[in-house]
Image (cartoon, coloured by chain):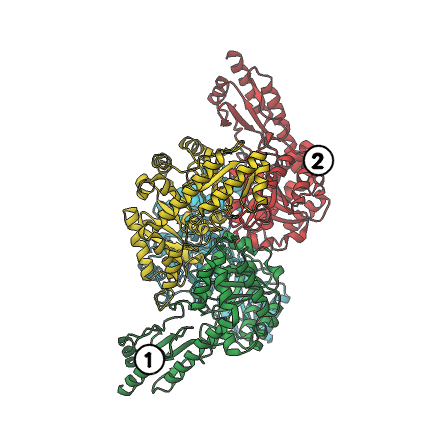
Chain colours: A cyan, B red, C yellow, D green
């Protein structure tokens, strides 16, 4: 047995989502999101978040993040974010593109998390009101983080307080939001709008959809011109039902959380098994579905030779990601080989 | 019986495409287009166009057009296009957005077509080399046109000659390219690269896919940095197989042409039936799957009252569009009611 | 004697302005517009316009126009303007650049002027609220127009009514605003904010400055973030006194109007002389300092042979522009030769 | 006596420059840079740099830098620069604006200088060719640096080697290039094109002009479309002679170097006097006209109380800048008070 742990975007799609898509493929429907599936998604998300939300489905997480930032930030604005955040490192300048030139201000923070003191200190040197400086306009948080950790509601609240206190809007990159909620066990509202998050880019793709993300505005009034921004970016899908049908199925009956719980459980099982090996060291607490682990070189090499795949993050630091469909057998097979290699080493 | 003739984007998706998508949903695959389905699409299009092409799937036609233009045109460039073209009227400024401010120069032309003399005259007044003027950089042709007509190869060739003679690249908006080829009966190469078209935005969505378009570069060298442009626009789908699996199935075994031939045949049947009614007048030759027809008001009203849907284009001018899945019974039912209404009027 | 009538930007600068600049060149002053000269300019313009204004000097008219539009228009916005307007034809896409891709909607109108019916009709087809269409956001008027005509206050009011009725802001390109006021004889307020103009790009360069324009906001609240927009466009001059000293001198003691009156008087003298020639025909009423005249080819050729310069606008249509410093002798010399040539012809 | 040492942009303009401007203000001249003064500037700079250059005057340093970067970098590009560089900290996002969203990658380095190892290490992690990452496209060096230090020719050469080896162009921000050359005593070519610099933004404003900078392309072929970029940014001055007349006078007879030598000499005198005070400490070698010095708080406070002005850079670190017109008496007066205060403390 072998398995690809490189990322949760190497996974396929959940059968419930695929079946819903197939069911939606027959007959006529109004285009551009004026269809029953899209209405359902808005209703479901309003229920899930316990408040009326405005929802805009798009096909990629990069679009969800960058479009959202473009709605929050003027072109002379600054977006404060973690220096390892996806928007800063892995979107080929999409945030700068969509915001027409706003600047990301990367901040360091352990375990992929920002902390309020670092943010406050950076804002203290920002030159607010000084015409030569880009102006703080948004804070971007990633939940779960790129390091596989999860912000607690009170951590988000503390960061939002600083941001709102400086007139900044708060964006949450939720490519793995489902994994965070599955871990926290709290209501989705508790870690978003109830603690001040303004807009969430909710990821469906990594969680079991084919290609579907939802920009969720907790204050629909803020979304007034978002439709135009989405259209001019080429992100208004004409047969909109095909994005919404995915999200509709994914959100129904807690499927999104059930899938995330599975991915998290597999990550727990995998990380616990690895942590028990001699010479292994977890770089961060495993709180979602990502594991960053240092393994002896011989073990890593042997696992690759056995057909398993993962990212060589940095030197001996490896990244392994579990997904909604990761079989327990794949985890166990991996651990078995790792243990054997470890004993030989 | 009733039917929605408003547009081919109210249609669902072809079963072959849906089935392929479902089949592609199982198991791991490399993300970001590095998957076997994507390779297949490139191979199929290279075969279909009888030349090696570089292919970039995206989810919307607006993205396909605007991204392509951004690869062809500097920000101080001008894109010459028909004044009724989709890029000029229906993309909320996406071409201006993606090109970072290039200017569309709309030209009039009967039947949705540009002609070489109009283009030549416009270029004569363009101020080429004059620093105060935007500089002609691309010609955009729509095939089939927004009026439902089709350029012949020699018509494209004549326009390309003018464009290339002025150092301009040639973009073809092929949202309904399949319908054009189905009508022309020529090889796809004959009306594209063999007559000088540089890049084709090939539309799959209207032709039976869920959401899939392909930017096709006939000279792969021109596409060198297109991947970066696509990524920073948020149009690189992470589970890329789900765009490519659609296109792969759609292009296989001439499905794309068979579906287009059906749509065209339904348009022929419908337009011929309508043309025979007293007081009816076709505005343009019906060469693809769009019909522009003037009908007496009582007839149009009666058809709507019977549940049929179509666009009120301009006053008494109606637009009806057939699709890959339009049932002949819908056409015949429509015509029967139209005839009855016509006789009463 | 010969003279260059091609444009008012071939002229030098008024001695009063040059002297003020020299006087301002000694000693220290706060940079970036925080200097006494800049304060003076704001005070003078508030007096001249009889209301508190916010003023932003820049070095070029293109910057003044394009920056202003960027403050009024979202990137998915549309700017309605005359099809011969400078922003549409002579700024190499600067408005599209500064607005991050907004679209100019050019409208025809005789004598360089827009009329309310044309504007209303265009807005009726704009698709307001339709996500596929750019959204009407600003009306741009040129005063005096590119045809050398001048809008009356009631003409501006009627256009503004349409614009404001559609939620659009109103920009006035006042590269030759001084000439318009000199002709109208009204208070500057009467043809600007009192009839609803929101922002004026007031031109000093053509009127006798070296390089100085002022963006004048009639509602300072609208200008809140203009300073950032100007800076990020590279249009905040570090030794700001050198822009403001020009404007300060130009606005003092009605110099701007006295210079404009001279230019207009020379245009009147020149146009009246030309109109009296056989075969000559003025294309537009001469209301500012620009003359569009058709002259027999032999006359035009002879004048050029004699060393006079003017623009060959279109075929036999010539453009002649007078300036703040055009000597009467140059006008009379031109007319004398024109008369001689005319008699020979 | 008091004096303003805050920056060299609080200074006025050199009499030679002002006189040249006044002389240029009379009579007609071709607009838009097609005037004899502009020709002179190109000729002078070609002589000074011992190679044929293409020159584009603009009114601000921000424009000179940002326009140049826009000519060198694609919108998905990355500009590597010092983290204290002006383009990164003091231009309100102008580089991001002009490049349509390229990203600055700030690197640390002592004394305001980059070093090749840091650059190489950063490029090693850049993800060249990876579609998710912005692509290294330009290196920006500041000469003299923001810390008042100066790159030696061999230092520039080593950095250029790394940049060119990665296919990056090299931009030099020369707002204080004159001060650097005055210090180095080398030929201007020796520290620019002969060691691989591609484009220099040569600053005249800080050195004695009113508002004039020159973008200098060492390879004129690279400048082919720069005229369009400048125009669409509103930086083509219509009465172009007024920029060029400044530069023409400033470059004539080594005036630019003479003025810079004076500023440098005043900085030397000032820094040497300060360094001799107890408790004073120069933060960086004084190699141009900027001094960064730590002074006891009582001394700094007393100097301000005496009417002298300087920047409180960071805590007790002060910045003092001398200019082309700084009187020796101002320096000596400052030092005398500083000494008195120091003795009392």
Asked which secondary structure carries label 1, the reply is helix
Asked which secondary structure carries label 2, the reply is helix
In x, y percent, where is residue A137? 38, 57
Residue at image position (29%, 50%) is: C46
In the depicted structure, whether residue D28 falls above or below residue A123: above
Residue at image position (63%, 65%) is: A306
Q: Nearer the viewer, residue A5 or B95?
A: B95
Q: Nearer the viewer, residue C152 or B4?
A: C152
Residue at image position (28%, 81%) is: D298
Q: Nearer the viewer, residue D82 or B121?
A: B121
Pointer 2 chain: B
Q: Which mark is residue B154?
A: 2
Q: Which mark is residue D334?
A: 1
In x, y percent, where is residue C88? 49, 43
In the depicted structure, whether residue D324 falls above or below residue B58: below
Q: Quadrant of residue D135?
A: bottom right
Relative to residue B14, is residue D245 drawn left or right? Answer: left
């Amino acid at each position: 047995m072998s398995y690809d742990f490189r990322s949760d975007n190497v996974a396929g799609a959940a059968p419930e989502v695929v079946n819903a898509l197939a069911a939606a493929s027959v007959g006529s429907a109004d285009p551009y999101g004026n269809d029953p599936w899209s209405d359902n998604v808005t209703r479901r998300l309003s229920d899930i978040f316990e408040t009326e939300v405005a929802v805009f489905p798009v096909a990629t997480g990069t679009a969800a993040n960058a479009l959202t930032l473009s709605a929050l930030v003027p072109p002379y604005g600054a977006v404060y974010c973690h220096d390892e955040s996806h928007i800063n490192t892995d979107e080929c300048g999409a945030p700068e593109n969509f915001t027409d030139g706003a600047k990301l201000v990367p901040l360091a923070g352990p375990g992929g998390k920002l902390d309020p003191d670092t943010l406050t200190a950076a804002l203290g040197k920002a030159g607010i009101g000084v015409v030569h400086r880009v102006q703080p306009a948004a804070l971007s948080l990633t939940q779960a983080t790129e390091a596989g950790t999860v912000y607690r509601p009170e951590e988000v609240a503390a960061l939002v307080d600083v941001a709102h206190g400086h007139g900044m809007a708060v964006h949450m990159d939720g490519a793995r939001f489902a994994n965070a909620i599955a871990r926290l066990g709290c209501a989705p509202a508790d870690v978003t709008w109830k603690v001040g998050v303004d807009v969430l880019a909710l990821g469906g793709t990594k969680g079991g959809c084919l290609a579907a993300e939802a920009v969720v505005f907790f204050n629909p009034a803020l979304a007034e011109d978002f439709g135009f921004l989405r259209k001019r970016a080429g992100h208004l899908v004409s047969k909109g039902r095909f994005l919404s049908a995915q999200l509709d199925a994914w959100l129904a009956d807690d499927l999104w959380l059930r899938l995330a719980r599975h991915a998290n459980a597999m990550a727990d099982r995998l990380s616990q098994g690895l942590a028990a090996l001699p010479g292994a060291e977890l770089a961060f607490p495993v709180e979602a579905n990502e594991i960053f682990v240092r393994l002896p070189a011989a073990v890593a090499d042997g696992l690759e030779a056995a057909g398993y795949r993962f990212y060589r993050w940095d030197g001996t630091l490896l990244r392994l990601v579990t997904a909604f469909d990761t079989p327990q057998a794949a985890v166990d097979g991996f651990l078995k080989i790792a243990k054997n290699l470890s004993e030989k080493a």
